[in-house]
Amino acid sequence: MLSSAVSKSQKIFIISRQLHKTAVEVLERNALEETITSNFASFIHGVRSEHLSDTVRHRSKRMILDSIGVGLVGSTTEVFKIALQYCQDMFSSSPISTVYGKKGLKLSPTLAAFTNGVAVHSMDFDDTWHPATHPSGAVLPALLAASEMLPAGSKPSGSDLLLAFNVGIEVQGRLMRFSTEATNIPKRFHPPSVVGTMGSAAATAKLLSLNKVQCTHALAIAASLAGAPMANAATLAKPLHIGNATRLGFEAALLAARGMEANPLILDDVPGCSGFSAFYGDYQPTAISVPEKDHVFLLENQDIAFKRFPAHLGMHWVVDASLSVRNRLINHIGSFNPSVIHSVLLRIPVSKYINRPFPESEHQARHSFQFNACTAVLDGHVGIESFSEDNINRHDLQKLLGKVIVEHPSDNEANFDKMYGEVALLLENGDILTGRCDTFYGHWRNPLSRESLLQKFHSNATHVLHEEQVKAITHMVEDIENLPDSSHLSTSLQ
């Protein structure tokens, strides 16, 4: 039930902002019952650490560790350097928050969140959820920067940070389930630029202990800061989507804390007055259960996909299929010899922005079925070094790319929970060898083992940190509930 203070605030809001008549009617009709937006605010404000199950704690700590690792290795990339230089040149106030991998360098909290968010997505190495989005990078950088912003004596604990992180993940997942459009590989906008911004606002609002009304406004403000077009996928600008999501959600929470107001029906479906529904054509919002009534976090039943190499998630199906058919070729002729390959047939789903026959940059290569399949066939693996300019332009690869044929079987849906990758090698002698992958290693149906995840983190983190630091971070994350001051995790990342 809305408190009298909230009701008064809504009346003032209606008068001063002259809301659309339909929105006013919805507000009045729901005076004694929660709206979808206020329901989400109740969840953000009311959820407690004891509501996190052991499974949710385990999976979210894996997400935190992986996100830190890809952010650290991402701090070596060109796009990160551009973003960092921009922040250093243009803004220098309140340099109190850590920048990943840059010892002694600090920025103002929201800009540190932005820069670190760019690092996380700079190689497209960060986690992916279903429906499709990159949840961790939009939330964790804001929380780490905020933990350093708060004064001594008010620092959030590791348990506080873990709870806020899960709030941000949960809000993203719930919002994506408001639309069936969100279940497929995106076409119009990049999902983390929308739901990630909302998740960052929710997570930061929780960490900053905003009240229910402020949580409502943080979500509404964030909606006005959300969105980025898919046309910028496979460009240097794509990592900005994550950087902006984590930064702008953070700023939305800070603005709400200072008294900024926005539409308290932002998540509700108000005819003729679009709120968050502006992003989806089949928007059907549903309430989130309050923690006191046995709320089950989405992460409990829907695990995360962790990438083994830095490329779009769809590439992992074709790479595993390519590795399979490469082994078949070796067994077939006794050794690997690309000259016996007449053509390479890819059976993949329809998705224009990851169908790139001849990529010309590392970011295009990370979003090319053709490049990743041919690289796996030629080299027997795909890794960070695969996307260097020299590797992209080498003669053998370009020659094999010229032999690729693409088919789109009707049963191969552009959906990370349903798609498959199939690669067939048609040999000069007429023989045909085929490899297929229905679920790659790292997918939520076949998750990385603890050993594999730790190996990935170690490999990424040691690009910029010493061995002792990497071990200390691993221990901090795995035992985060007992960390008295979560800012210690942030300051350890340089």
Image (spheres, rainbow, N blue to C red):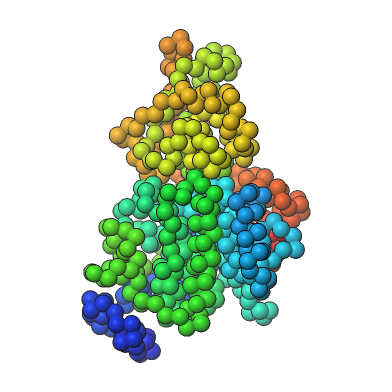
Q: Where residue 326 sits in the image (x, y, percent)?
A: 53, 23
Q: Where residue 40 sits in the image (x, y, percent)?
A: 39, 71
- What residue lies at 57% left-to-right and 13% top-to-bottom? 334
Q: Where residue 483 sits in the image (x, y, percent)?
A: 66, 67
Q: Is residue 316 visible in the rendered structure shown here?
A: no
In which image quadrant can residue 157 be found? bottom right
In which image quadrant can residue 81 be found? bottom right
Q: Is residue 415 visible in the rendered structure shown here?
A: yes
Judged left or right of residue 449, residue 260 is left
- What residue lies at 42% left-to-right and 54% top-to-bottom? 229
In the depicted view, which residue is nearer to us: 437 or 7?
Answer: 7
In the depicted view, which residue is nearer to us: 122 or 431?
Answer: 122
- What residue lies at 56% left-to-right and 43% top-to-bottom? 310
Assign the N terminus to one quadrant of the image: bottom left
Count of marks placed on residues: 0
Task: Residue lying at the far top in this picture: please name it.
Answer: 429
Assign the C terminus to one quadrant of the image: bottom right
Judged left or right of residue 438, residue 242 is right
The vertical placement of 73 against 90, above or below, is: above
Task: Residue lying at the far front in this picture: please name it.
Answer: 90
In the depicted view, which residue is nearer to us: 283 or 12?
Answer: 12
